[in-house]
Image (cartoon, coloured by chain):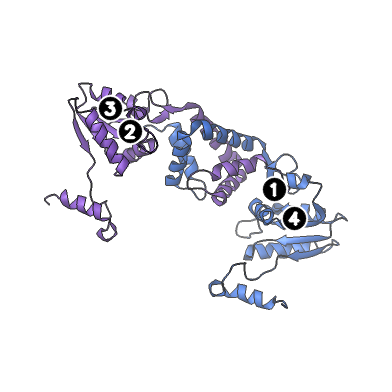
Chain colours: A blue, B purple
Amino acid sequence: MAREQTEIDTLITMLAKLPGLGPRSARRAVLHLVRRREHLLAPLSEALVAVAEKARPCARCGTIDIGEICPICADPARDDSILCVVEDVGDLWAMERSGFYRGRYHVLGGVLSALDGIGPEALRIPDLAARAAVPEVREVILALNATVDGQTTAHVIAEALAGADVSITTLAKGVPVGGELDYLDDGTISAALSARRAV
Amino acid sequence: MAREQTEIDTLITMLAKLPGLGPRSARRAVLHLVRRREHLLAPLSEALVAVAEKARPCARCGTIDIGEICPICADPARDDSILCVVEDVGDLWAMERSGFYRGRYHVLGGVLSALDGIGPEALRIPDLAARAAVPEVREVILALNATVDGQTTAHVIAEALAGADVSITTLAKGVPVGGELDYLDDGTISAALSARRAV
């Protein structure tokens, strides 16, 4: 088509690249936005500008949030004696959604990967060792993904923290809530069996 | 949770309200954005600001696009003798994607609806009559949805244009390309049968 790209086309192209969206859903979203310009477009663009300007890695835990120190690290009500190690910001968000955990976090920013050349230094593991060495800290929970890379990383972290006076724990493995045995893989069933508990 | 809403939460909440997105996909999108702040977040917020500032209804056809007159109305290469009447901006975009139509448009901004109290004045039908009365215009295509409201609107428009020296046409009804007869409704099959053509 001879038609030039307008700002609207640019916006659709950019939105279409986000995970979970494609050209069709990006078009629908932009259509919805331009139809409700006053009510939606201006507030959304302000919200994006605010995040673009203010979002940064937390100097303490490494998550991405607003401000030099993220709201979780800055919250005096949280338990300083537990550190939960997660791979990435999304995992921290998932932990927070459960509403169960009230300690602090340490975000690695990835997992060890020989293939991608990601070593311990890139993952803030020395930082973690320093934080775990603080006398207040009693427990480090390794909440890493149950993948090969995640488990390798957990192993390396456990070694790096061997000298510190903390107990190192990992998330329990087993049947997910609502899960049906028939659909679970053998590894999960084996793990759930070997970690079985008295009723 | 005791945690305060940050700008990131606000952004997720706003994105989650867009059609086709929900809380989960909005979270994934924002996570993707904050992880790639430099490359994605700033350009996207600029694109949104540009659209928020510049998008407006075209003074001629009524679509929403950039500028006082939209690029289609401003394009001297398009055919002034045909006017295509569509219900909404999304329908115009759909027509343009087909790449087949090279005439002008008239966007009603809705269809007649007794229930919602939408009458002919609200739909820019007098405007359309004035545009159709220009001697250059030879044909008005009613590209309205094949719904009851769409067909009622087509009927009213046809009456409003009765005095103008233009031929009034509508889109053909029939089997969609790739469509299987077994999955089509009776009305479509009847329409396709009665409009059958020699091979």
Identity, as a three-letter code, of the amino acid under mark 4: Ile
Residue to which mark 3 is pinned: B77
The secondary element bearing badge 4 is classed as helix
Label 3, label 1: how many angstroms apart (C-alpha)?
53 Å
Q: Which residue is mark 4?
A: A125
Point out the frontmost of discs 4 and 1: 1
CA distance for labels 1 and 2 = 45 Å
Q: CA distance from mark 3 to mark 4?
A: 63 Å
Q: Is residue A199 above or below residue A163?
A: below
| Residue A189 - label | none
Callouts 2 and 3 close, C-beta under 8 Å: yes
User: Which residue carries the number 1 mark?
Assistant: A63
- The first of marks 1 and 2 along the sequence is 2
| Residue at 74% across, 53% down | A105
| Label 1 element class | loop
Mark 1 neighbour class, 10 Å CA radius: few under 14, some 14 to 19, many 20 or more: many
Judge the density around disc 2: few (<14), some (14-19), many (≥20) Cα neighbours within 10 Å: few
Q: Could you tell me if residue A21 is visible in this image?
A: yes
Residue under disc 2 on the same chain as residue under disc 3: no
Percent position of residue A56, x then y: 68, 41
Q: Which residue is mark 2?
A: A2
Q: Residues within 10 Å of mark 3 (few under 14, many from 20)?
A: few
